[in-house]
Image (cartoon, grey):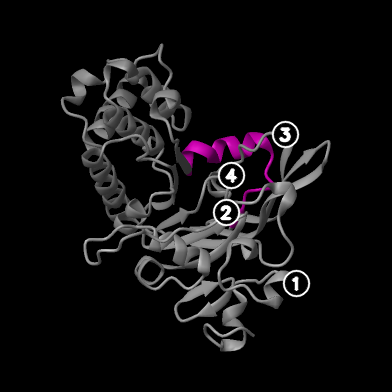
């Protein structure tokens, strides 16, 4: 459904060009949920923003291709891309309160979105809007549809935002931190809803989050992002249980479990590098406890390790875990 090839995103500043996304490639199949996880500033949300064409100057896509169902969309004129955005690609933003216009009723926002991507009349669009609210689990949708955003709880607002993303029955949904700031029980409901949409509609989902619990419960595959590049990508089971890249391993080790009782969780020293101070070689080398000479000189590309792809020199030439 979605194919991203060698994507590069840069920001032109007075101090020079800063590369925020550096040669990212991945695919998402119909009905599949691909999770993207990493620290703040890794480039997760920016990747989603690039896919839907919402990067504003001084940002720009400087290389690579984005294909939707085999058709390239990153080089389309703004007007053509606007028709695709919403109709074929839906977006669930992080904060549902800022995603909804506070001065308009929910019905007006849903109906306007439906009619923008179809030739339905108002009455027909309203019926479809009520059906969408029913599908996302809004109780008494015939009454609640005429409410304002502030009359809904955080979880209900997020459901309305998901309904908005579904208005034109898109092929792909980009969900940017859809469970942030929601309590655990509501998070579980939103996760269940996303999985149901994939199963029933065959919708592909790119799930951006920093919550590994959400990834483990929701995604089919996961891409671990670090400093604008994919450090590891593979099935959720493989990455969560047997992470191979030192950064991915550190992220997974920071998750508390009921199976093992440790005095301390794993801690990754240091912080994500600034865009103007990304080290040479592997960008993770200043924080890595397995660093060796080659890591300081050369930047590794993704290489197959079992069923995963890992960007780490420890796995070069098929020698798993041994410096090459």
Give percent across and percent down for residue 263: 31, 61
Going from N to C along the chain, the mark reached first, 4 or 2, is 4
Name the residue rendered at 38%, 72% in the picture: 238
Marks 4 and 2, how far apart at CA: 23 Å
**Residue identifier under label 4:** 46
**Residue identifier under label 1:** 297
**Residue identifier under label 3:** 57
Determine if residue 154 is in view. yes
Marks 1 and 3, how far apart at CA: 33 Å
CB under 8 Å between discs 1 and 2: no
Name the residue rendered at 47%, 39% in the picture: 87
Q: Tell me the mark number nearer the camera, choosing from 4 and 2.
A: 2
Residue range highlighted in magenta: 71-88
- For label 4, the SS is helix
Marks 4 and 1, how far apart at CA: 27 Å
Q: Tell me the mark number nearer the camera, choosing from 4 and 1.
A: 1
């Amino acid at each position: 459904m979605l194919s991203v090839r060698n994507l590069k995103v840069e920001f032109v500043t007075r101090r020079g060009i800063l590369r925020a996304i550096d040669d990212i490639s991945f695919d998402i199949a119909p009905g599949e949920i691909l999770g993207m996880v990493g620290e703040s500033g890794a480039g997760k949300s920016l990747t989603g923003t690039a896919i839907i064409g919402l990067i504003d100057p001084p940002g720009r896509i400087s290389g690579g291709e984005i294909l939707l169902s085999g058709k390239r969309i990153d080089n389309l004129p703004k007007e053509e891309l606007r028709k695709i955005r919403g109709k074929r690609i839906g977006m669930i933003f992080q904060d549902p309160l800022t995603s909804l216009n506070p001065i308009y009723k929910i019905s007006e926002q849903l109906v306007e979105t439906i009619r923008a991507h179809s030739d339905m009349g108002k009455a027909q669009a309203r019926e479809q809007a009520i059906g969408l609210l029913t599908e996302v689990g809004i109780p008494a949708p015939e009454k609640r549809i005429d409410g304002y955003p502030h009359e809904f709880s955080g979880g209900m607002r997020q459901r309305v935002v998901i309904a908005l993303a579904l208005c034109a029955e898109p092929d792909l949904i980009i969900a940017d931190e859809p469970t942030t700031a929601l309590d655990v029980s509501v998070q579980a409901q939103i996760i269940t809803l996303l999985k149901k949409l994939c199963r029933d509609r065959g919708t592909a989902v790119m799930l951006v989050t920093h919550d590994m619990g959400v990834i483990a419960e929701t995604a089919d595959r996961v891409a671990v992002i670090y400093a604008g590049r994919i450090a590891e990508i593979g099935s959720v089971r493989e990455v969560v249980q047997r992470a191979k890249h030192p950064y991915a391993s550190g992220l997974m080790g920071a998750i508390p479990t009921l199976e093992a009782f440790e005095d301390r969780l794993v801690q990754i020293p240091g912080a994500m590098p600034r865009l103007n101070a990304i080290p040479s070689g592997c960008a993770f080398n200043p924080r890595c406890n397995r660093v060796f000479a080659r890591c300081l000189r050369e930047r590794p590309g993704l290489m197959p390790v079992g069923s995963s792809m890992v960007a780490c020199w420890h796995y070069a030439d098929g020698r798993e875990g041994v410096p090459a």
